[in-house]
Amino acid sequence: SHGFKVCVGNRSPSKVETTVDRAKAEGNLPIIASDTVEDFVRKLKKPRKVVILVQAGKPVDDTIDKLSEFMDKDDLIIDGGNEWFPNSIQRAKRLEPKGIHFMGMGISGGEEGARNGPSLMPGGPKEAYDSVENILTTCAAQVERTGPCAGYLGPVGSGNYVKMVHNGIEYGDMQLIAEVFDVMKQLVGMSNEEIADQFEAWNKTELSSYLIEITYKILRKKDDKTGKGHVVDYVLDKTGMKGTGRWTIQEGAERGVAIPTMAAALDARMLSARKEERVAASKVLNPPTAKEDVVKDLVLDDLKAALYASKVCSYAQGLSLIKAASDEFGWDVNLSECARLWMGGCIIRAELLTHIYTAFDENKDLPNLLVNPFFSSQINDRTQAWRRVVALCVTNGIACPSLCSSLTYFDTYRRAQLPASLTQAQRDFFGGHTYERIDAPGERFHTAWTDAHKDIGDANQRTAGENVQV
């Protein structure tokens, strides 16, 4: 409790009792119980500060309704669940007539974060945040160089959004690690122990991260059920998901921001869920007949480079999405602050976040992480290795959707000229959608491509209201 006196409540009295008993056993912590919602609210010091942790959606609304019945003006409700950000905005509006503040706060860290300090991503009224700042910064994970992993992100909705994108990056990062594991296992022929050793070694380099750390620990875990092999070899290859990854991909489309690393990771999870179909397909769809030989040490060096470059692309995409939403909704989210909050406690904490923090701290108008001098140099030095890894996977029939999508993102973003000119010409051919000319910027044109095409009049009026991404 970090010295704070906390009242706990739950619809199940036994859970309240268990929590209070555990608090006493772990040092007589100042945790007190409540019997009813009214009792819970009455036991809180005014202005009251309530954090709710319930399943997203209707359960949150129901909980807020019950709490607000007994709460007063200037009290504060903080929803700490993974919630769709428009829902938080609507809840704040619904509580305004009562004068009750509302904040949506993303929380990351899992069980370890709950014990040792999570990353907290709050969004809501600044005065409401100020009233709980000391509590949040005290309870959050602490990083020696940059302080507590809690800080004000912006108006209501912004905290939920940053947490949503955090989870999208998490999807991408986990998929990238899985793809590298697959290459080590299937192509290089390494054992679980050997792969664990490699990930542990990488965790002492620029790849140092929580997800790399848990990967080598997972790979070393022996199966205590059978006494044979490792647990990972008995885990069914179907990856679950709870919705934040899907929301992130939806938001990428809504904001016109390309996030292919995360989208590929979501696709991979959906394909993994079709286990029976994949088993049947494996009997009729053939793998490559000719496979490329591999040199272990060379492949491992290339994998390390490809993983780093792809991780940078995943962060670049996520931060670009946050910036687009922040600009559209007027949130003024500080991207360097996002990186700072992710440095400790959370699932995507990683060494490279130190450099991401510096990049946006030095240039708040940085259009994309890839063009930061440090990261552009780091990625340029790794591109040949990156390409060799993707080519190796393709040649040998090893799916690497996120590694490949990351490289494609890089190759598309770095080009001044794209084949999009042909695509736009096709749109004008079949739909009269018009196009801009490189020698007449800002004007719209339509071409009568064949004798069957007619003049459509003023081409600029033709595109009025069209959602043209710039």
Image (tube, rainbow, N blue to C red):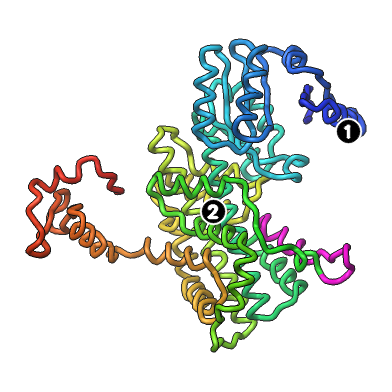
Q: Residues within 10 Å of mark 1 (few under 14, many from 20)?
A: some
Q: Secondary structure at mark 2?
A: helix
As shown in the figure, which amino acid type bears the numbered disc 2?
His
Q: Residue at 23% of width from left, 58% of height from top?
A: 427
Report if residue 263 is visible in the image.
yes
Q: Is residue 57 above or below residue 417?
A: above
Quadrant of the rendering where the N terminus is positioned: top right
Residue 419 rendering spot, x and y as whole percentages: 28, 66
Residue 224 falls left or right of residue 112:
right
**Mark 2 and 1 residues: CB-CB less than 8 Å, in contact?**
no
* Furthest-right residue in this view: 25
Give the x, y percent position of residue 291: 56, 86
- Residue at 55 percent across and 71 percent down: it is 399
Q: Nearer the viewer, residue 413 or 42?
A: 42
Query: Which residue is nearer to you in this view: 268 or 384?
Result: 268
Q: Which residue type carries mark 1? A: Arg
Does the magenta run of residues contain 211? yes
Residue under pointer 2 = 355
Location of mark 1 (residue): 22
Q: Relative to 212, is 148 above or below? A: above
Mark 2 crowd level (few <14, some 14–19, many ≥20, 10 Å Cα): some
Q: Residue at x 50, y 71 (%)?
A: 382
- Residue 206 appears in the picture as rendered: no
Q: Position of residue 196 (x, y in %)?
A: 74, 69
Q: Which residues are magenta?
A: 209-229
